[in-house]
Image (cartoon, rainbow, N blue to C red):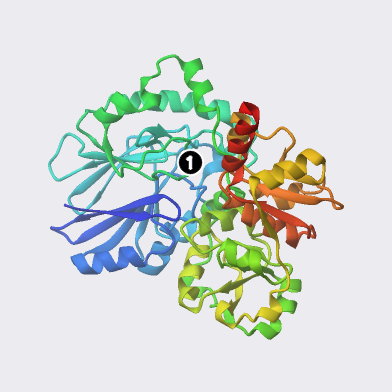
């Protein structure tokens, strides 16, 4: 048997290829939309991808099951659990097999057993893996059910997809699903769908795999035996879900265009930049420091780094065409990254190398924590905190107001238009993006507080001691 692990650092998303070396057939578990790595690995190992198996309707990335089925003719094994609201609409358009709890299917001489594990979502299933002639499972692909050190959150249907009243039901289902997990042998390996950094839980570990025994000994959720206490802990302090999660649920339920049919973006000159700002949403991918020194008015700043995809999901509108200001060497990868969360409307790319200083007419100011607090105490600036609710509840500056960075475009109406706005996050990374969003919305007198709340807290503590 062949087992390969694939990990997208930008989305903290794991997928797996399992192959039968005797028959040369392979299946991909929870594939990402960019299927190139699977095709390359299969070719290298002399395998043919004949199937995909999906644990649930994902909320945080575009699934590659449809992509693989249409481009390779593979069979998609999809959950038939949950009510009518959680059925795969695209299943009728491909070669698919709908499976329920207790069903089995084979890929070569390898057997997969379906275990219904609702809680994160109603239709969620896990896959127990049996090698040839084994009567005990070797491992379990848990998707967003059990992670290393954590479990899947039950509130996404309510928080991201707007399905009211589902959080408590999901938490109860998760409590019962974990009983099934505890009944598995301790030696069974655990292959989860996400790692540290994913918003699908609140305390995911960075170790890629685990075992049932280790999770029973160390995972907080598997230590709890009181259902009410479990539900309270599971539903408290979950991170606020990114805006794009609601769109992913729709896309992964109904289907999305195959990527090789998407038109490549047009590379255009800077002479069109003003028109593009008027007609599209323009994203400048330079560093926040570069953007602060000069940028095209009306653009927003999402630096192209490992967090680019998740912040694009928060800040970019799915219903509008996109223009990117990016480095020529990043063009192809940036489009792939955007497609991984369904942002398919990338129409134009402006090479950052062609940006002249004459176009970069807008700036914002960096100020120290001391300067910001002094100005705030005098009433000269309005302090805006763009951190999440958990950070805010733990500690915040009493004169600040909070609007989550990802909700700024929607919730900015109450901000002052006749006063300097000094914005901060925890350390200064998110606040730079926030400064760009504010300026694109028409708030031009913006300051970024260097060092964020960490620096502000140091100043405030020093003042209290003094």
Camera-nearest residue between 168 and 456: 456
Camera-nearest residue between 1 and 115: 1
Camera-nearest residue between 43 and 422: 422
Question: Element at badge 1?
Answer: loop
Q: From the viewer's perspective, is 274 left or right of 31?
A: right
x and y, in percent, of residue 438 in the image: 73, 56
* 74 vs 80: above or below: below
Q: Quadrant of the C terminus?
A: top right
x and y, in percent, of residue 22 in the image: 13, 58
Q: From the viewer's perspective, is 443 left or right of 282?
A: right
**Quadrant location of residue 112?**
top left
**Quadrant location of residue 324?**
bottom right
Q: Looking at the image, can residue 158 be seen? A: no
Q: Residue furthest top?
A: 226
Identity of the residue drawn at 50% across and 37% down:
121
x and y, in percent, of residue 77 in the image: 37, 50
Q: From the viewer's perspective, is 443 left or right of 358?
A: right
Identity of the residue drawn at 47% across and 39% down:
123
Q: Which residue is mark 1?
A: 200
x and y, in percent, of residue 24 in the image: 18, 62
* 121 vs 222: above or below: below
Q: Looking at the image, can residue 111 be seen? A: yes
**Quadrant location of residue 402?**
top right
Q: Residue furthest front?
A: 466
Q: Residues within 10 Å of mark 1 (few under 14, many from 20)?
A: many
């Amino acid at each position: 048997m062949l087992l390969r692990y694939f990990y997208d650092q930008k989305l903290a998303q794991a997928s797996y290829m399992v192959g039968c070396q005797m028959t040369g057939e392979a299946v991909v578990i929870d594939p990402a939309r960019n299927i190139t790595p699977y095709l390359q690995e299969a070719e290298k190992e002399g395998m043919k991808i004949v199937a995909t198996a999906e644990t649930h309707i994902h909320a945080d990335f575009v699934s590659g099951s449809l992509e693989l089925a249409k481009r390779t003719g593979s069979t998609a094994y999809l959950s038939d659990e949950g009510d009518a609201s959680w059925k795969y609409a695209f299943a009728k358009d491909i070669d698919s097999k709908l499976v329920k709890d207790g069903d089995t299917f084979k890929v070569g001489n390898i057997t997969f057993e379906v275990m219904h594990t609702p809680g994160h979502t109603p239709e969620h299933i896990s896959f127990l893996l049996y090698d040839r002639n084994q009567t005990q499972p070797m491992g379990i692909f848990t998707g967003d059910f059990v992670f290393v050190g954590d479990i899947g959150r039950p509130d996404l249907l309510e928080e991201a997809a707007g399905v009211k009243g589902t959080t408590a039901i999901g938490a109860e289902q998760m409590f019962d699903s974990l009983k099934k997990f505890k009944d598995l042998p301790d030696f069974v390996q655990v292959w989860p769908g996400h790692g540290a950094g994913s918003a699908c839980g609140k305390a995911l570990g960075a170790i890629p795999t685990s075992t049932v025994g280790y999770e029973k000994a160390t995972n907080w959720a598997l230590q709890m035996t009181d259902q009410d206490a479990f539900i309270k802990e599971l539903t408290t302090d979950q991170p606020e879900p990114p805006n794009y999660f609601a769109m992913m649920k729709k896309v992964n339920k109904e289907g999305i265009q195959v990527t090789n049919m998407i038109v490549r973006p047009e590379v255009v000159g800077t002479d069109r930049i003003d028109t593009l700002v008027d007609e599209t949403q323009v994203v400048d991918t330079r560093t926040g420091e570069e953007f602060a020194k000069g940028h095209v008015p009306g653009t927003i700043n999402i630096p192209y780094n490992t967090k680019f995809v998740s912040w694009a999901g928060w800040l970019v509108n799915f219903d509008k065409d996109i223009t990117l200001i990016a480095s020529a060497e990043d063009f192809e990868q940036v489009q792939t990254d955007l497609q991984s969360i369904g942002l398919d409307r990338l129409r134009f790319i402006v090479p950052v190398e062609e940006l002249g200083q004459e176009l970069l007419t807008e700036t914002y100011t960096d100020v120290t924590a001391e300067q910001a607090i002094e100005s705030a105490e005098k009433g000269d600036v309005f302090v805006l905190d763009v951190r999440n609710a958990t950070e805010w509840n733990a500690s915040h500056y009493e004169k600040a107001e909070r609007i989550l960075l990802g909700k700024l475009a929607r919730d900015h109406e109450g901000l002052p238009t006749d006063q300097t706005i000094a914005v901060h996050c925890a350390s200064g990374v998110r606040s730079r993006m926030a400064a760009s969003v504010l300026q694109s919305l028409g708030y031009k007198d913006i300051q970024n507080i260097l060092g964020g709340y960490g620096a502000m807290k140091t100043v405030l503590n020093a003042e209290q001691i003094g």
